[in-house]
Amino acid sequence: MKKQIQPCLILACCFLTQTGFAASCQQGEKTTIWTAPRVAKVGKPLKILAVSTAQPITNLVITLPNGEKKVVKGAANTGQPWQFVAQIDALEKGAYQINALQKDQSLSCVNVSAEKDSAAKKPVWNAHYETFYSAWIEQLFDYPVDENLSFPSLEPVLRNSERNFLYNYLGANEDKALPATPDCADLAYMLRNYFAWKNGLPMSFRACNRGSTKKPPSCSAVIIRDDFVQKKVSLASFKSVNHKLLDVVHSGNARTASANEETDFYPVALRREALLPGTVYADPYGHVLMIVKWVAQTADSSGMLLAVDAQPDNSVGRKRFWEGTFLFAKTPSAVAGFKAFRPIVNSRSLRSNAELPNYSAEQENLSPDDFYAHLYKLINPQGLEAKQAYEATLTALVEQIQTRVKSVDNGELYFQKGGHPIEMPKGAAIFETTGAWEDYATPSRDMRLLIAIKVLLNFPDKIVRYPELFNLTAQTAPQVKAQIEQLHQNSIAQKKIQYRRSDGKAQGLSVADILARKTAFEMSYNPNDCVELRWGAEVGSEEYASCKRHAPAAQRKQMTTVRGWFRETKRPAR
């Protein structure tokens, strides 16, 4: 577990004079204590996770079977849901009592015994489990915020016993051979299904279409699976259910209309308490991300909203919220925005919009500029320092470029291993298809890169358009704009990335180089082209000399025909 969540993971040796269990011990209304594994074993560790939606948890009091009390002191993470983690290294025989406190106020209490199943007799997707799910998602990806976090798939994430609170939760070594290679649309579903499996909860999903040029996707009747309910289900059974689920769902499931209740997801209010880890973000063009952490704004640094996504090659990476990653546009073919899983009421139905306290259609009525302005105010409630905000935008662009390096490299590896030329889909299908093109082409990523470049280049003008977002002090917006323009010229020359050319030599590019090649990235997504072309190398240059592979002439002609989509950074309607 991360130190920033709870610095004291092992029981501190602070003893209290009182002994004996509290006469009344029950879970709190807004604070819940969870333990892992599901059936605790004598002599084995017991992980403890206290989660609250009401207030920070400052310490735990753990009463041992002999009546002795120990206190674990620390600080919860900085935002909702608040978490506090601890561990008993070797469980003894007998009953333990765990009490979560905010200073001297008891928030929640639970009794735990070895060899006793801690799962609820009739687990349901209530507020306690939803908050547990949110805290679990945050822990999975809670690495240092300045780390460029990326994994080859979801497997190393779920197999990390330190960060995955549910690792080996069923006591059957079920995670060691767990396959986990979802793409962007499947990631949220697989994490939700995994959580349901470990906790004995039902799981729901629907078959949906992809919408049309005039209306967003719609879905058929809900499928509710109760395979895990009140059972300890084997890995083989989980794999079977998961395979059937992922065969049905796709990105269209998240782009449904706000008022539609026959959906897997519902739109949430743009409030901090509603945008919890585990909330998904559906962009209008088919990509899906998931919130994993809020980083609070400080006097020295901007706040951040972090999310993860999966790519067609199954890699999983962490992204920060900004216009270049979270695309938002008004289109009749999709309803974009932040959405949460619709909870299951029972084995037959899901909650309606009226039953959901965080349901809101407000995002559908916002312009893109207003949407981004609203989110930036949530992320940085004290206002932005223009220099910090520019540097955060530049850093986000560099992260996006670095992620593209890996995607392009994957295409090169395909050909190095003897891969054959890849067929290019026709028309708008270049953005949504299956097979080798989906795995190795980058039309969606390059469209986002072009949008991100536009955001960075337009940043100085943003200061003049939205001065209320910035702490301008005694300076005028035009004065600050001029300062940022000078900072921009200096910074883009210093920030650099590196890719490997066809001859194996490293090729460095500054952000200034990338920006100068902006038009080249309108034609850079075809994996049949050499890596030099995919990074915009000029024909005849020294950098281009090692290029040996070109896309077929018919494909280049087709790319020229649709180039306007990339130049205008607007994906075509389906």
Image (spheres, rainbow, N blue to C red):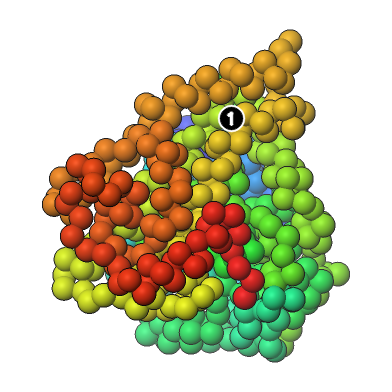
For residue 155, side relative to residue 365 (left or right): left
Residue at horizontal 70 percent and vertical 19 percent from the top:
478
Up the image or down, 470 lies above or below 256; here it is: above
Q: Residue at x 38, y 27 (%)?
A: 493
Residue at the location (22% across, 76% down)? 420
488 over 325 or under it: above or below: above
Which of the 4 image quarters holds residue 523? bottom left
Give the labeled residue for mark 1: 389
225 relative position to 434: left or right:
right
Crowd band around label 1 with a 10 angstrom C-alpha radius: few (<14), some (14–19), many (20+): some
Name the quadrant of the C terminus: bottom right
Could one spot residue 229 in this view of the protein?
yes
Q: Is residue 41 visible?
A: no
Residue 219: x and y in percent read 68, 83
Which residue is more in the foreground, 400 or 163?
400
Q: Is residue 263 left or right of residue 164?
A: right
Q: Residue 154: x and y, percent?
A: 39, 64
Q: Nearer the viewer, residue 31 or 92?
A: 31
Q: Give x and y (percent) for residue 258.
A: 78, 68
Left or right placement of residue 91 versus residue 108 in this view: left
The percent coordinates of residue 549 (x first, y second) are 22, 63
476 is higher (above) or lower (below) than 126: above
Residue sitting at the far top: 474
Looking at this view, is 264 or 229 the one in front?
A: 264
Query: On the image, which quarter does residue 282 sit in?
Result: bottom right
What residue is drawn where x is 55% and y is 60%?
564
Kindly state the secondary structure of the residue where label 1 is placed.
helix
Name the kind of residue labelled 1 in the image: Ala
